[in-house]
Amino acid sequence: MLPTTRRSLLACFAASSLLLAACTAPTPDSDPVEPTPTPPPVYTAELRLPDQPATIVEGPDDVALAAAASSAMFTSAPVAVVAPSRAADAQLRAASVAVALGAPLLILSTEPELEPEPDAAVAPEAEATEPGDAPGTETEPAATPTPGPPPTNELALAELSRLGVQAVITVGEVTLDLPQVTVVAAPTDDTALATLIRVALQVSPLHAGDEAGWSEVEVVAGLDRDAPTLLVIDPVPVPGATDQPATPPADASTAAAPSPAAATATDAPEDAAPDADSSPLPLTELATPVEGGLLLTTGDIADVAAVATARAAGVEVLTVPTTHPGSQPEHIAAISELQPTSTIALGAAFGPVDSLEWKLATAATGVELAGGGQVHFPERRYVALYGTPEYPALGVLGEQDLPASIVRAQELAAEYQVHTDDVVVPAFEIIVTVAHRYAGDDGNYSTEFPAENFLPWVEAALEAGVYVVLDLQPGRTDFVTQAKLYEELLLYPNVGLALDPEWRLKPNQVHLTQIGSVHIDEVNAVIDYLATLTRENALPQKVLILHQFMLRMIDGRELVDTSRGEVAVLIHADGQGSQGAKAGTWNALHQGAPEGVWWGWKNFLDEDVPTLGPAETYQVTPPPHFVSYQ
């Protein structure tokens, strides 16, 4: 038996419990407590970038290109946007929606496949014969159907499947039927569209017409998913750049019902409560962009969807019409600032991939050639002093000291600048190995001056905006061997190379008795060496000059390798004497010249009769891109 005190405590506790129960018992008139509603899930796309420094995305049309771009940048997406091919209005509107939602934009072709062509041997009204028909009345067998165009739409459909989309927004005349996927036609009303996607859209009218001053790719590249904009082509110019925003309800989780137009377009229930979210799309939020991405486009209209997908993924876009990202200073500055680790280029013209990697790595250095950019031609022309400071008698370069040589080259280039819209760059062509009448200790009939002798000239030229070409006269050795002697100079961004076959001897030849020559295999070996050096060290493109005044000086010249983008190959006409003779040499050298080479001209101050001035030199056809004075 419990002690009296313990029994009393239990009795008090029991009485208190009964009293509490009596006080909290529900009355018949009280409302039941409703459970808190579970908020709807929010979905986010998964983004990615290719592992390689450069990736080239290509396809036969905008359908394939859009699918490939989506595959490169999206692992998955809850929502995608689809627009018709070759429909600028619809694609701009679709791009606006895609970027606002952070969703990929895909394209579908609406063109029907080609119909089979009827066999000419069968009359249209011919009918199949029945038993008992007269002999000879049988019809010919049906023609084999002509295949239709490649089914690139299948690429778009396969991409939607890979993305695992829950919903697709179609913009424009697109018919799409996907099992277990919600397909929503975007409203044509701007406010209804904003309600559908739950994003406030700032309307940006684009004036149509030849004087509009914009392109589809440029305006899409300028879209920012953190400042959603709706691009609308306005045929009538209106004052101001932007209109009032098309604004959805402030709280997307309790969005108001769309307008009647939107309800029709999205199949929303007509009796939706004003404070209910009747959008059939899943709730989404923007994915965090992957760092280091860049997309390159030439500005082709077929790139619109791919550009929109990049902006939806938060990837920067750069338009480079020349397909060389280092051709213009503004492109170099953008790449240098961004320092991309994964670049996607739209179109095979950017290739091959290894060449694109070099261009991007070089652009990332921010180093430019004199006159801007990292490519020599066609927008640059050079005017050079030829010779060597080691032997002043060999040309005008050695007639004055280094500072005076820079001034003379700059003044001469200025005389040419007034005759062309291209940038004219002052230059030195320095003979670093000089042909010699004696064999010398090494027996090669060539004097190789130490590279350090010319280092002050290279560095002063770099600072002054002067390009330098190292000229080789190898005697009985080869051009590659001599070029490697000056590699420390070739590693400077303002230094190129010149080969002088006149002074390239065979084993039994000597200078001034025979005119030298070189086989194209040796020239191409130099190109390969110079291109590899340039690529491996992320240097701007280099000039390689081939001096020539007789066709036999370069055996197999038509096979010169101009495919290496790291090297600009230029044939330099070295003829001297009367202008009639020089013109004949110039025309002869152009006969059978390989594709992709540039042209240079030499003015001899003492030997030419007469010596051409700047205006006359640029009247040579075609006008030379490299002019030197000896």
Image (spheres, rainbow, N blue to C red):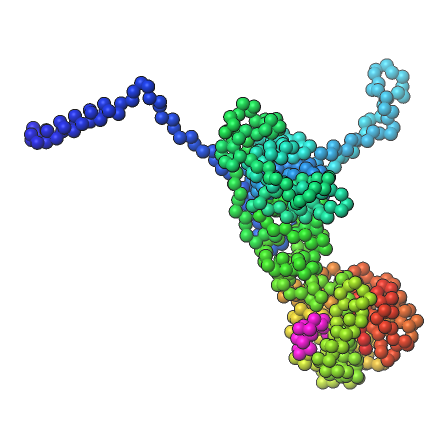
Q: Position of residue 452 (x, y in %)?
A: 65, 79
Q: Is residue 593 shown above or below 445? A: above
On whether residue 400 falls in the magenta region, the answer is no
Q: Is residue 472 magenta?
A: yes
* Nearer the observer, 354 or 90: 90
The residue at 65%/32% (across/down) is 188
The residue at the point 91 percent across, 69 percent down is: 584
Residue 285 in sight from this viewpoint: yes
* Residue displayed at 87% across by 28% down: 121
Q: Position of residue 89 (x, y in %)?
A: 69, 38
Residue 190 image position (x, y, % from top left):
62, 35
Using residue 558 as the reference point, say whether residue 492 is left or right of it: left
Magenta residues? 455-475
Give the camera-side residue of 29 and 265: 29
Question: Considering only vertical position in the picture, is 391 above or below 201?
Answer: below
**Residue furthest toward the front?**
239
Locate the C terminus and report the quarter of the image it occupies.
bottom right
Question: Going 72% across and 77% down the picture, which residue do you hit?
Answer: 406
For the question of whether residue 451 can be seen, the reply is: no
Q: Quadrant of the N terminus?
A: top left
- The quarter holding residue 74 reads top right
- Above or below, 41 against 425 in this view is above
Percent position (x, y) of residue 551? 86, 69
Quadrant of residue 577 within the rendered picture: bottom right
